[in-house]
Amino acid sequence: MPVKKIMVVDDSPTERFFLQELLVKNGYAVITAENGEEAVAKSRGESPDLILMDVVMPGLNGFQATRQIARAPETAHIPIFMCTTKDQETDKIWGVRQGAKGYLVKPVDADDLLKKIAELG
């Protein structure tokens, strides 16, 4: 199924804006969430085709939100890419264990991100 609607989850307005602009310019519909709680709620209501999830956020962090989305029957089909400054191998392994399908380290390389999205479709 081709990716059309992407949810960007990040507590940084700058990061959300950067990713949203990049994705919209490349033909994707974008919804945003500022934290893990909002991401879990919107993943149910909006049914995005892909979620780009930051890790370090107040409240429910990206690992916790990913786990909730990946394990809930109504949202388990949505692929999640962790999109974070946490670049240790253990972080990547933990992200995959929570249900992430991909792991990108910030600053995100635009071409790399678009290529990974295209590979999903």
Image (cartoon, helix red, strand yellow):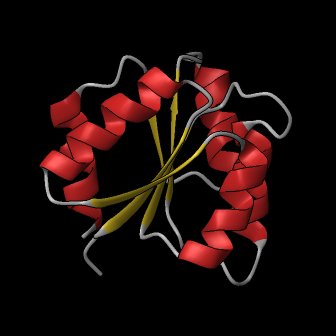
Q: Residue at x 53, y 70 (%)?
A: 78
Report the front residue among 12 and 49.
Answer: 12
| Residue 50 visible in image | yes
| Residue 105 visible in image | no
Q: Residue at x 49, y 63 (%)?
A: 79
Q: Is residue 19 left or right of residue 100?
A: left
Q: Residue at x 22, y 39 (%)?
A: 22
Q: How many marks?
A: 0
- Image location of residue 101, percent across then percent down: 50, 54
Q: Residue at x 25, y 47 (%)?
A: 23
Q: Where is 120 relative to 45, above or below?
A: above
Image quarter hosting the C terminus: bottom left
- Image location of residue 108, percent across then percent down: 33, 25
Specify the farthest residue to the right. 59
Q: Where is 50 relative to 44, above or below?
A: above
Image quarter hosting the N terminus: bottom left
Q: Is residue 50 left or right of residue 53?
A: left
- Image location of residue 116, percent across then percent down: 27, 48
- Image location of residue 37, percent across then percent down: 78, 51
Report the front residue among 59 and 87.
Answer: 59
Q: Is residue 49 left or right of residue 29?
A: right
